[in-house]
């Protein structure tokens, strides 16, 4: 098992470890018992992961003498709302949860974001552990303490920064992950290459087929590398005041596309289209060479992700949705652009005309 330490400013948040390995299910149970002692453990999961792993995990905790129970909710982004938070809080109250309870978020990004949010507000906060089961969650959402739920006006509009006390990444969960969901994770992996690590980007270009077939050694190295990139950014800028914004590369437009498609476009698909758009905007503004845009588009396509925006989505509606982005300042929508692969920067005053032109170009 490999270990990465996330070192945070102790005045605000405690540091924690990310443990990464394959077939470490039983060891995770023992590590939780040893390192995160609690009077009561509640595994929070969705109904899909609950059936696959959740019940087994809660039973494994009980089998070593721990007081453990399980709460699940319907799988999918449509559950990522305040109603689910209230339902979970109600079930926690009924189960006798108190401040000595430790929550265990077992699932993808939706479970992690919802359970983390509950942990941050339930009884003015209880500890929680992240056990990510999707590739998106393993390389991205389980690390860094961003929690939250969607709101009528857009994605992740209600949330907190609240760090987990540990993250356990078991790559064997990915064996049951549908290909579409796996591809969503590839979008985040490609993002890390684009914003931080040209060397990893090249490894991805040369080995995308092996990665798609989940080559064990390659997967371990790539997932570990992504976790290291994310943790380094979070360490410098835990509350997203500056540097952490580069992690939103492709996400500004991606979130808008997800929302206006009523989430028929997945997070990874939205990010893939958003990354393509950001590269094209960078190119049209004279920052990025055409060849770099081509490399980005080509890798995204080879990963099985879209580089075209569906015809049915209207550019004006997409821009109206962008205006609701919670990261905008006044009327300025911040975009992460590129000078080259591995060199991002943040730009605030992009003309809406240019964004609309790129959207139209991507619909062809
Ligand atoms: N907090 C952050 O920093 C952050 C970062 C990136 C994304 N996110 C959020 O994460 C969410 C997307 O996460 P996601 O892509 O993991 O989606 P998800 O949590 O909805 O999971 C996708 C689907 O895969 C199923 N699943 C999960 N693990 C499985 C497994 N091992 N085998 C089979 N099926 C499995 C789930 O039940 C679900 O149906 C979005 O809401 C996004 O906003 C948050």
Image (cartoon, helix red, strand yellow):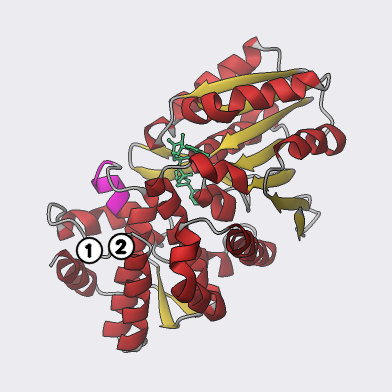
Residue 303 locus on image (x, y percent): 38, 63
Residue 238 locus on image (x, y percent): 65, 59
Residue 114 locus on image (x, y percent): 53, 35
Judged left or right of residue 272, residue 239 is right
Q: Judge: label 2 CB < 8 Å from ligand 1.
A: no
Callout 1: few (<14), some (14-19), or many (20+) C-alpha neighbours within 10 Å?
Answer: many
Give whichever of 64, 11 is nearer the camera: 64
CB under 8 Å between discs 1 and 2: yes
Residue where numbered disc 1 is placed = 308
Residue farthest along the right direction in this orientation: 34
Question: Is residue 331 covered in magenta?
Answer: no
Give the residue displayed 35% in from the left and 67% down from the top. 302
Judged left or right of residue 358, residue 302 is right
Where are the magenta residues, as a range?
257-262
Q: Of the residues under marks 1 and 2, which one precedes in the sequence?
A: 2
Residue where numbered disc 2 is placed = 273
Give the residue displayed 58% in from the left and 33% down from the top. 115
State the CA–CA distance, disc 1 to disc 2.
6 Å
């Amino acid at each position: 098992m490999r270990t990465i330490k996330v070192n945070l400013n102790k005045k605000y948040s405690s540091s924690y470890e990310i443990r990464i390995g394959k077939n470490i299910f039983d060891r995770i149970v023992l590590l939780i018992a040893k390192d995160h002692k609690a009077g009561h453990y509640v595994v929070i999961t969705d109904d899909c992961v609950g059936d696959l792993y959740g019940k087994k995990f809660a039973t494994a905790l009980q089998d070593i003498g721990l007081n453990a129970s399980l709460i699940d909710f319907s799988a999918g982004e449509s559950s990522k709302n305040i109603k689910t938070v209230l339902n979970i809080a109600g079930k926690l109250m009924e189960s006798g949860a108190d401040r000595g309870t430790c929550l265990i978020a077992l699932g993808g990004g939706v479970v992690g974001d919802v359970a983390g949010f509950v942990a941050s507000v339930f009884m003015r906060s209880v500890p929680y552990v992240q056990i990510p089961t999707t590739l998106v969650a393993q390389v991205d959402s389980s690390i860094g303490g961003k929690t939250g739920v969607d709101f009528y006006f857009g994605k992740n509009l209600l949330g907190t920064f609240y760090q987990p006390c540990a993250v356990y990444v078991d790559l064997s969960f990915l064996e049951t992950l549908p290909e579409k969901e796996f591809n969503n994770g590839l979008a985040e992996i490609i993002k890390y290459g684009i914003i931080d690590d040209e060397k990893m980007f090249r490894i991805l270009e040369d080995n995308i087929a092996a990665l798609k077939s989940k080559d064990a050694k390659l997967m371990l190295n790539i997932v570990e590398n992504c976790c290291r990139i994310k943790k380094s950014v979070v360490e410098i800028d835990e509350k997203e005041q500056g540097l952490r914004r580069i992690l939103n590369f492709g996400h500004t437009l991606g979130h808008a596309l997800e929302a206006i498609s009523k989430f028929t476009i997945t997070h990874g698909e939205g990010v893939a289209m958003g990354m393509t758009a950001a590269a094209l905007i960078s190119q049209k503004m004279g920052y990025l060479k055409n060849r770099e845009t081509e490399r980005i588009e080509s890798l995204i396509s080879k990963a099985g992700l879209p580089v075209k925006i569906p015809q049915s989505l209207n550019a004006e509606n997409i821009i109206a949705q962008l205006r609701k982005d919670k990261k905008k300042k006044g009327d300025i929508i911040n975009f992460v652009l590129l000078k080259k692969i591995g060199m991002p920067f943040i730009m605030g005053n992009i003309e809406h005309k240019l964004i609309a032109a790129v959207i139209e170009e991507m619909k062809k």
